[in-house]
Image (cartoon, rainbow, N blue to C red):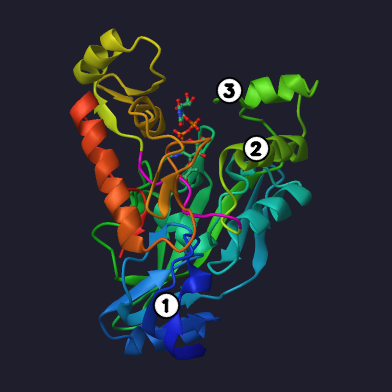
Amino acid sequence: MKSFIDYSLLKHNTFGIDAKCQRYIEYATEDDAVLLACELKKPFMVIGGGSNLLLTKDYEGTVVRSAINGCEQLSDDGNDVLVRVGSGEEWDAMVAHFVENGWYGAENLSLIPGDVGASAVQNIGAYGMEVCQLIERVEAVEIGNGRKVSFSTAECQYGYRQSRFKNEWKGRFLITYVTYRLKHEFSPRIDYGNVQQELKSRGIDKPTASELRQVIVDIRKAKLPDPKEQGNAGSFFMNPVVSRSKFESIQKEYPQMPHYFVDDEHEKIPAGWMIDQCGWKGRTIGHAGVHDKQALVLVNRGSATGQEIVNLCQMIQNDVLERFGIEIHPEVNIV
Ligand code: EPU
């Protein structure tokens, strides 16, 4: 187990905020996770790749991160492959590994930053896919007693960017392994956003999995800033799900508004579109800004404090509420 005192989290948050924690611990095996779970005292915070984290001040407690690596094939029935992955593996490296091995299903989730464990907490999603559609089981260790537990996907209660780990189970478990069910047969999902259009422009009719992965990578790179160049945490806000009557009243005024069907009573509206309509795209307040290619992404223009980004977030929330009567909420964890 690695352990550091008075440790800078600069390398552990993609917003590039230089905040410290009192203690930082990495567990690299399940046995370490058990030991740590027995001795961990509050306050503590579990992080992944720090790609969904906004630090507003030094953290007066222990920051914990998984460094459990490895990817093991558990079974293969000729159709489905079950693959068990250490929670400390980088998600996108795993997507690349799955594609290389002919294990399909994760391509649309290419280039999403962060670790495997965090992706199962956050239920990462993109281009019509959510990771919960691939998850078979999540293994963890219970904080306080070190008990090993294993949850089915249903028990994790996944929803749009939601899981039980983010809600009633918050602070209860250290995730150790995630098992995915992947397919030998490749059935591409290309009906979302501009994926099909991008494939067409490359003269690709029926993409292979690596071609689809490449298209997703390129679309993301064109829209989303590279955290190494400009600190950010991807989408800052969640897309709000609103009642059908609310949606219809806004649509009357904005017939061009993009939207996604949720169920008979609800529709999802892209927060990025609303923020863009409010004139925020590309703006800068102090050292915090709104990305010029995608208004859902807040960026650190260099030496921004976490508080500056929170202030910008609040200004945007107020404007969206005033103009559309909709509250938007951060996807990013603000600490
Ligand atoms: N739009 C604008 N202006 C903007 C941004 C978006 O008009 O500045 C419009 C777009 O033209 C499009 C719609 O809003 O019609 C949706 O935009 P986009 O396809 O870029 O997706 P998003 O809703 O902004 C979500 C996810 C992303 C994911 C993409 C693609 C959330 C919070 N975000 O973004 O996930 O990559 O869809 O599937 O659901 C992330 O979570 O960090 C993330 C990047």
Classify mark 3: helix, strand or loop: loop
Are there few (<14), some (14-19), or many (20+) residues within 10 Å of tag 3? few
Are there few (<14), some (14-19), or many (20+) residues within 10 Å of tag 1? many
x and y percentages locating residue 325 in the rendered image: 19, 27
Residue 329 falls in image quadrant: top left
Q: Vertical placement of 13 versus 259: above or below? A: below
x and y percentages locating residue 240 in the rendered image: 30, 34
Residue 174 falls in image quadrant: bottom left
Residue ID at (56%, 75%): 68
Tally the marks: 3
Q: Earlier in the sequence, mark 1 or mark 3?
A: 1
State how far apart marks 3 and 2 are (Cα). Answer: 13 Å
Residue ID at (46%, 38%): 282
Q: Which residues are magenta?
A: 229-238
Residue ID at (67%, 58%): 93
Classify mark 3 as within 8 Å of ligand 1 or not, answering yes or no: no
Classify mark 2: helix, strand or loop: helix
State how far apart marks 2 and 1 are (Cα). Answer: 31 Å
Name the residue that disc number 3 marks. Answer: 191
- Judged left or right of residue 17, residue 326 is left
Name the residue that disc number 1 marks. Answer: 64
Q: Nearer the viewer, residue 189 or 233?
A: 233
x and y percentages locating residue 97 in the rendered image: 72, 55
Q: Vertical placement of 295 versus 192: above or below? A: below
Classify mark 1 as within 8 Å of ligand 1 or not, answering yes or no: no
Name the residue that disc number 2 marks. Answer: 216
Could you tell me if residue 185 is visible in this image?
A: no
Magenta stretch prevailing secondary structure: loop
Question: Are discs 2 and 1 less than 8 Å apart at CB?
Answer: no
